[in-house]
Image (cartoon, rainbow, N blue to C red):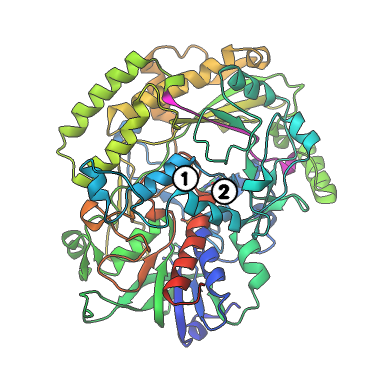
């Protein structure tokens, strides 16, 4: 049920979830399955119920949603010196459902190896891994085998029929997909003719297809991805309409909207184990600007996402003591790694003109064609308005550059890395990440996806058709940081991506973007590319390509790892049960707990984290059997 700010403060909550986003909504709904648990959710935005801007899958539509304060927190990075001094937009969904409400709906898992690495980075055995001792599961509960059931629990897949599958050269395996979960998934039902040639070029380069990519495979695959689209209505299935809505009448699930968490309240004294206890949450009603405190009997769970979860902890006095005190925030727990280890992907788009006889999303910029496509969608749930991303591929680095180059890059990286006297925690991540530079590695290093439209509004011309190729290096070595810039909870935090801090990140982006371009010289893609649009055809030297990247690269909006699940002495913020160090009952559940970014988009993992956290909590309170 939804209540107002005053009523919310009077409830006797067992749990309060700070942020009703992707993971937070999933977690709160699962906790409320236990009728004796009273669960509160505080969400900063509205519930954009039945809003067609959200529900319609067509990606071009999102231009009205991203950078619109109704739906987006509108964060920007600090000026990035290696991106021509630009500040990059970081879109974050504002509203019940969080970023699952505004994203491109890819419902993807990374490969087995990547989730197993999260397990290996854990506590307390990571120290053994670091010193070279035998490897075993160290973040209990976080290996591929343990997380897979939670991907399945979140999903209800409608897989393409065999005929459809043959047409799109793809395989989907019912045995590894969920069939009873709340998130409805399917494959886009509208394909542009501009896309199959891209698919064929990748197959020609040795990428596998015809199998379900989410079977644990990490790379060297091309696939029409599963998307969070309900195929019956051809609408977005997201945390608010799929987890919350069917359970909205539960009296023990109490949702407060348009209210911003200002801080988590902590006990004045430590318990016998030396931990502080979260006793409640202070929040501001953003309509009346009044503040309230709601109290909690069991746990507070922070689920504000990769950017706002570290901010909420810092505002509560948990973080780097010196930094917090410089802004007049009283330090309660000195945890200097909050907000550090910030990772995201970078993305570079290239646009190409294709024959205008090919139907692409660009037809929607023609008012007449747009009107008739929209009518078709509203009447029949068909046509270009149903379209989502239709092809995605991950490659290992050895497909992009030769072994000698990889050897040189590794030597340069080692020199740069060790010259910085890295902490033990960074060294541990480095040891795992560096393996991707091995010429024999089969792990994901670069993602490509294609979409049938021009990525750049400034080069779009009427009555022309385009396709774009996006290149996304999967794991950067650089680490950024996110910290409060003042003691005012309503100020945005400082978000520094620290782009290309390590030269190798720039080299991989350059090589990947060049390869993305070279794909269009291969048949059958060559046959359909009429013109290079952006960058223009004369882009040639490394300097020119680097300049293009510096002027245009952005992120696919995957900020994470800012409250890493690692041993405390290795830079950790939460333990494997997601409890914040130095507290007994304050947890974090969202993608900020990942210790290293995954070579995939993060929504399905965010749901799995919410589901996982719910079971940990149920287990800890003796109600999961
Ligand atoms: C534009 C875009 C496109 C993307 N495309 C894809 C894709 O196609 N596939 C994919 O897998 N991933 C995609 N992602 C990434 C994916 O959506 C996110 O990684 C994932 O949803 C993050 O989940 P989360 O629970 O960590 O955070 P969120 O879902 O962002 O939830 C955080 C919630 O906390 C609320 N909140 C924050 N601070 C406060 C506060 N102080 N008080 C109250 N409430 C607060 C927010 O309003 C929000 O609801 C995309 C993301 C974006 C933004």
Closer to us: 181 or 268 = 181
Question: In which image quadrant can residue 170 be found?
Answer: top right
The residue lying toward the viewer, choosing from 108 and 41, is: 108
Residue 513 against residue 622 in the figure, above or below: above
* Position of residue 415 measured from the top left corner of the image (x, y, whole percent): 19, 27
Left or right? Give the position of 104 relative to 383: left
Local packing at callout 2 (Cα closer than 10 Å; few below 14, some 14-19, many 20+) is many
Question: Would the CB of label 2 be found within 8 Å of ligand 1?
Answer: yes
The foreground one among 199 and 317 is 199
The disc placed on residue 80 is none
Asked whether mark 1 and ligand 1 are closer than 8 Å, the reply comes as yes
Magenta segment: 384-397
Q: Quadrant of the N terminus?
A: bottom right
**Residue at the limit of the structure toward the front, as seen here:** 134
**Tag of residue 103:** 2
Q: Which residue is mark 1?
A: 557
Labels 2 and 1: the sequence-earlier one:
2
Residue 490 in view here? yes
Classify mark 1: residues with Cα within 10 Å, few (<14), some (14-19) or many (20+). some
Q: Position of residue 43 (x, y in %)?
A: 50, 68
Q: Is residue 139 above or below residue 466?
A: below
Q: Is residue 97 left or right of residue 547?
A: right
Nearer the observer, 3 or 230? 230
Is residue 387 one of those drawn in magenta? yes
- In percent of width and height, residue 534 lies at 53, 22
- SS class, disc 1: loop
Residue 57: give x, y in percent of width and height.
68, 47
Residue 118 inside the magenta-drawn segment: no
Q: Residue at x 28, y 24 (%)?
A: 410
Residues marked 2 and 1 touching at CB (< 8 Å)? yes
Residue 50 higher or lower than 108, as above or below:
below
């Amino acid at each position: 049920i939804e209540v107002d700010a005053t009523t919310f403060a009077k409830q006797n909550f067992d749990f309060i979830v700070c942020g009703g986003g992707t993971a937070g909504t999933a977690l709160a709904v699962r906790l409320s399955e236990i009728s004796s648990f009273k669960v509160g959710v505080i969400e900063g935005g509205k519930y954009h119920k039945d809003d067609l801007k959200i529900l319609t899958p067509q990606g071009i539509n999102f231009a009205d949603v991203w950078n619109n304060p109704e739906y987006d927190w509108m964060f920007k990075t600090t000026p990035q010196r290696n991106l021509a001094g630009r500040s990059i937009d970081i879109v974050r969904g504002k509203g019940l459902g969080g970023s699952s409400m505004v994203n491109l709906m890819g419902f993807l898992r990374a490969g087995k190896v990547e989730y197993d690495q999260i397990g290996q980075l854990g506590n307390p055995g990571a120290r053994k891994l670091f010193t070279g001792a035998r490897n075993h599961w160290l973040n209990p509960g976080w290996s591929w085998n343990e997380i897979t059931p939670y991907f399945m629990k979140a999903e209800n897949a409608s897989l393409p029929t065999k005929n459809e599958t043959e047409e799109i050269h793809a395989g989907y395996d019912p045995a590894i997909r969920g069939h009873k979960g709340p998130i409805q998934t399917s494959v886009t039902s509208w394909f542009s003719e501009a896309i199959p040639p891209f698919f064929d070029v990748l197959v020609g380069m040795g990428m596998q297809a015809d199998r379900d990519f989410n079977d644990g495979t990490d790379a060297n695959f091309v696939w029409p991805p599963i998307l969070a689209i309900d195929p019956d209505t051809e609408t977005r299935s997201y945390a608010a309409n799929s987890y919350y809505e069917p359970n909205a009448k539960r009296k023990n699930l109490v949702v407060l909207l348009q209210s911003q968490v200002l801080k988590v309240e902590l006990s004045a004294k430590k318990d016998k184990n030396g931990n502080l206890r979260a006793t409640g949450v202070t929040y501001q009603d953003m309509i009346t600007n009044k503040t309230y405190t709601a109290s909690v009997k069991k746990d507070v769970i922070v689920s504000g996402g990769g950017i706002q979860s570290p901010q909420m902890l810092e505002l509560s006095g948990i973080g780097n003591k010196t930094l917090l005190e410089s802004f007049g925030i009283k330090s309660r727990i000195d945890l200097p790694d909050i907000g550090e280890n910030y990772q995201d992907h970078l993305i570079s788009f290239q646009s190409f003109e294709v024959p205008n006889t090919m139907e692409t999303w660009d037809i929607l910029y023609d008012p007449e064609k747009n009107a008739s496509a929209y009518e078709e969608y509203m009447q029949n749930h068909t046509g270009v308005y149903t379209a989502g991303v239709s092809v995605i591929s991950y490659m290992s680095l050895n497909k992009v550059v030769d072994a000698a180059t990889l050897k040189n890059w590794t030597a340069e990286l080692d020199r740069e890395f060790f010259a910085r006297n890295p902490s033990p925690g960074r060294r541990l991540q480095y040891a795992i990440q560096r393996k991707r530079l091995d010429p024999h590695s089969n792990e994901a290093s670069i993602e490509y996806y294609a979409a049938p439209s021009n990525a750049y509004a400034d080069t779009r011309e009427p009555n022309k058709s385009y396709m774009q190729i996006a290149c996304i290096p999967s794991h950067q070595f650089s680490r950024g940081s996110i910290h409060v810039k003042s003691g005012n909870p309503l100020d945005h935090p400082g978000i520094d991506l620290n782009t290309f801090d390590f030269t190798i990140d720039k080299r991989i982006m350059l090589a990947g973007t060049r390869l993305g371009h070279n794909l269009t010289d291969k048949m059958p893609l060559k046959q359909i590319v009429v013109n290079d649009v952006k960058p223009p055809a004369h882009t040639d030297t490394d300097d020119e390509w680097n300049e293009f990247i510096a002027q245009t690269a952005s992120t696919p909006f995957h900020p994470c790892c800012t409250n890493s699940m690692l041993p405390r002495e290795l830079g950790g913020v939460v333990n494997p049960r997601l409890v914040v160090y130095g507290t007994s009952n304050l947890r974090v559940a969202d993608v900020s707990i990942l210790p290293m970014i995954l070579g995939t988009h993060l929504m399905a993992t965010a749901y799995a984290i919410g589901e996982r956290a719910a079971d940990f909590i149920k287990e800890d309170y003796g109600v999961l059997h």
